Image (cartoon, rainbow, N blue to C red):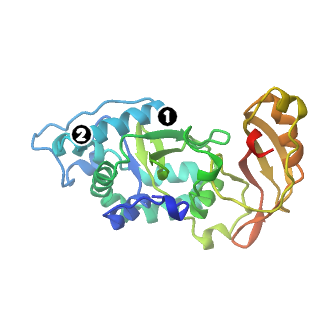
Amino acid sequence: MSAGQPRRVIGITALPLLLVLCSASAAFAQQLPPSQSATTPQQTSTSVVPLIPVYPDSAAGLDKLMKGMLELEKHGDTNALAPYLQSLVLPNPDAWFKSIFGDTVGAQLTLSYEPTAKGLPQAMAATLKNLRQDGFADHFEVVDFNGPCASPSFMVESETKSLGLSAVKLLGFRKQHEPMYTVWFRKGRSVSTMAFFVYDEGAFRYIGKPEIPDSVGAQGPQPQVKSGGPVQAAKLIHWVGPVYPVAAKEDHVEGAVTLHASIGSDGSIQDLSYVSGPQALVSSAMHAVKQWKYRPMLLNGTPVTVDTCITVIFNLGSR
């Protein structure tokens, strides 16, 4: 589970279990992975391997899966929930990690995944329970992290949460940019995330945020980090405020302009494109952001290029 601003960190009573969950990996299939079904402690009492629904590889599909698991947990139906939890384990971790991250990095991630996979069903069950008991289960949103400036609709600039350097690094070392999903839970102004879910062999799997070892990262060229969402990638060191367009003032136009930016290894804005927001404010926002300067993000001590999103807020009340 990710940690954001201190005043918005959720209070979970079984934190150690959640920490295990966030470093584990998961999967969702129509039935239990054959290699795991014989030993799962939550196997149902019937001799037939239970089937669970098949969901499409999309944010909507993962949303339905999450709702189904939360509903079963709410009603205490552990037998029905068990196959969902067990299916969260990658059926062939070595093949999947190597196909996405290449042989060298993939082999290391496979090794780090093995111990966490064993405890994933129990850790996920505990997390679902904690989310419900602490009031987070009723409001959540699934986001495909490959999308430009992907973030849940309830997020605003002041609530942007960092998924951490390990997540940034993980995304940057991908050879194949398959969809990677995050689930964002909210209670009031407190936000928590569950990252990352992937889709493998016709089902969703949870891989957590396995860390790329520094020794592995140092062996090859540094990647371009594609954050795709609210990842705290670099620190702003030179800011130029946008000029409020006169016409927009007269027409009482206000709101947030979201831009997709590429921050170079020297900290300058290299590429900038429009994502969303009032058209009347876009030109002013882009003109200002192009002059911003960031402290470069480092991976293994080397500056890297970062793709991220920037939100510029225009508020008539403050002008």
Residue at the image point whose x is 77% and y is 57% from the top: 305
Q: CA distance from mark 2 to mark 1?
A: 20 Å
Q: Secondary structure at mark 2?
A: helix
Where residue 299 appears, as percent x and y from the top left, is: 69, 67
Q: Is residue 57 visible?
A: no
Where residue 307 appears, as percent x and y from the top left, is: 73, 50
Q: Is residue 269 above or below residue 11?
A: above
* First of labels 2, 1 by sequence position: 1
Q: Is residue 274 above or below residue 4?
A: above
Where residue 6 appears, as percent x and y from the top left, is: 52, 65
Q: Is residue 123 visible?
A: yes
Where residue 292 appears, as percent x and y from the top left, is: 85, 55
Q: Which mark is residue 72?
A: 2
Quarter assignment of residue 204? top left
* Quadrant of the snapshot with the C terminus: top right
* Quadrant of the snapshot with the N terminus: bottom left
> What amino acid type is highlighted by mark number 1?
Ala
- 97 and 86: which is toward the camera: 86
* Mark 2: few/some/many CA within 10 Å (<14, 14-19, 20+): some
Residue at the image point whose x is 47% and y is 39% from the top: 141
- 5 and 47: which is toward the camera: 5
* Mark 1: few/some/many CA within 10 Å (<14, 14-19, 20+): many
Say left or right for 209 vs 309.
Answer: left
Residue position for label 1 = 59
> What amino acid type is highlighted by mark number 2?
Leu
Residue at the image point whose x is 81% and y is 26% from the top: 251
Q: Secondary structure at mark 1?
A: helix
- 255 and 61: which is toward the camera: 255
